[in-house]
Image (cartoon, helix red, strand yellow):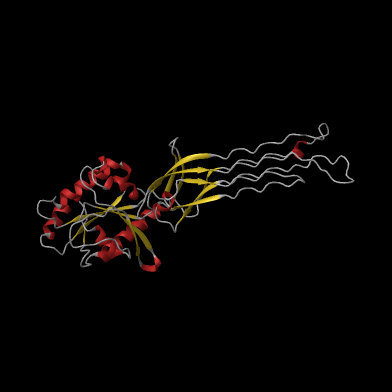
């Protein structure tokens, strides 16, 4: 199950109390204070783990509490600190403070680590307060409470290329053909219900990540259909791959109209996303009437269109080469490798 949103409560451990104690040993007069300090409470950390794909694991548990520090004891024995608690999340997760609404960290790289609740400091024992003017202090500190907060987690997939298109444009078939991903593919009309990722291998050990999201329909940016719920998963992509059915069923939009609907919905969702590099693909070129559909699409795009058949496999090599070439140009202009 693909889960891309979650809310969790995190609480760090409280510090242990300091100890009031005095040295009491035979033949040791005026032993003085020997109360130890309390241990610090454990902190709660979030770690970006590339082995995790969704937020499903964290939804199984709503509260994450780190252990408290142990209290200090006599004979200058300090309390043991509580162990830190690690929450592993997928790369691409945005961590927000639920109540304040501010972003705490965008976990865009594997291994990134964020402290979301710091453990309380342990209290000092009475030995700490001993001085030349107060040799027998009878006071100690209480441990501080650990921090706590509600977090809102939002996952945005990390991919180089995002597949967008109307339902039944053949995006899932294209993903399966170009990569080793195995999304649902069938001979009857249906739409993808959750995002899918695939890795496309190229020459000289090069590769790119391809993301497929549920099909968009007109009005998607206002919440119609499923597309708007998952559009955020292509916000990090460098290229938008517009997949258009070149031979639509009777009564459906023409390829040119389908492309205009896609552009309109993406622009309404995000002007920045609409300005992203794009490659337009006319799919299902093996069907009757696809040639006329290709001409309709070329008139709407006013540019080059890649004609492919994901089912037969024609045109996919040329499409893959064009994607690699475009990615190379984009990376050349962003040498730091920073994503959109």
The N terminus, quarter of image: bottom left
Q: Nearer the viewer, residue 9 or 238?
A: 9
Quarter residue 138 falls in: top right
Asked if 128 appears above or below 307 in the picture, the reply is: above
Question: In percent of the image, x 50 and y 54: which residue is there?
Answer: 111
Check the image and name the residue furthest to the top. Answer: 133
Q: Is residue 3 visible?
A: yes
- Residue 87 is situated, as x and y percent measured from the top left of the image, at 49, 51
Taking depth in this image into account, of 156 and 122 the one nearest to the observer is 122
Quarter-of-image position of residue 18: top right
**Nearest to the observer: residue 78 or residue 254:** 78
Relative to 202, residue 46 above or below: above
**Residue 334 locus on image (x, y percent):** 41, 51
| Residue 100 location (% of width, % of height) | 45, 35
Name the one closer to the observer, 211 or 42: 42
Residue depicted at 26% across the width and 55% down the height? 192
């Amino acid at each position: 199950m693909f889960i891309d949103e979650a809310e969790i409560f995190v609480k760090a451990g409280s510090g242990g109390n300091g100890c009031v104690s005095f040295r009491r040993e035979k033949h040791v007069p005026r032993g003085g204070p020997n109360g130890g300090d309390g241990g610090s409470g454990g902190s709660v950390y979030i770690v970006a783990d590339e082995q995790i794909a969704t937020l499903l694991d964290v939804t199984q548990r709503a509260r994450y509490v780190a252990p408290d520090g142990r209290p200090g004891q006599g004979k200058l024995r300090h309390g043991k600190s509580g162990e830190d608690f690690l929450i592993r999340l997928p790369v691409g997760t945005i961590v927000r403070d639920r109540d304040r609404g501010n972003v705490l960290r965008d976990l865009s790289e594997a291994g990134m680590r964020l402290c979301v609740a710091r453990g309380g400091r342990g209290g000092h024992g009475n030995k700490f307060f001993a001085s030349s003017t107060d040799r027998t202090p009878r006071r100690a500190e209480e441990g501080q409470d650990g921090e706590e907060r509600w977090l809102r987690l939002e996952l945005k997939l990390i991919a180089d290329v995002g597949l967008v298109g109307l339902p039944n444009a053949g995006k899932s078939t294209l993903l399966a053909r170009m990569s080793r991903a195995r999304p649902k593919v069938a001979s009857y009309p249906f739409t993808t219900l959750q995002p899918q990722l695939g890795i496309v291998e190229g020459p000289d050990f090069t590769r790119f990540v391809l993301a497929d999201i549920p099909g968009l329909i007109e009005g998607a940016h206002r919440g119609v259909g499923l597309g708007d719920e998952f559009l955020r998963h292509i916000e990090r992509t460098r290229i938008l791959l517009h997949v258009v059915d070149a031979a639509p069923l009777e009564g459906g939009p023409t390829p040119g109209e389908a492309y205009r609907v896609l552009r309109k919905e993406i622009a309404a969702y995000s002007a920045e996303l609409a300005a992203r590099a794009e490659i337009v693909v006319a799919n299902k070129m093996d069907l009757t009437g696809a040639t006329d559909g290709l001409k309709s699409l070329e008139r709407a795009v006013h540019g080059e269109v890649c004609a492919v058949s994901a089912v037969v496999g024609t045109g996919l090599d040329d499409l893959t080469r064009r994607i690699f070439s475009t990615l190379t140009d984009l990376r050349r202009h962003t040498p730091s490798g920073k994503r959109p």
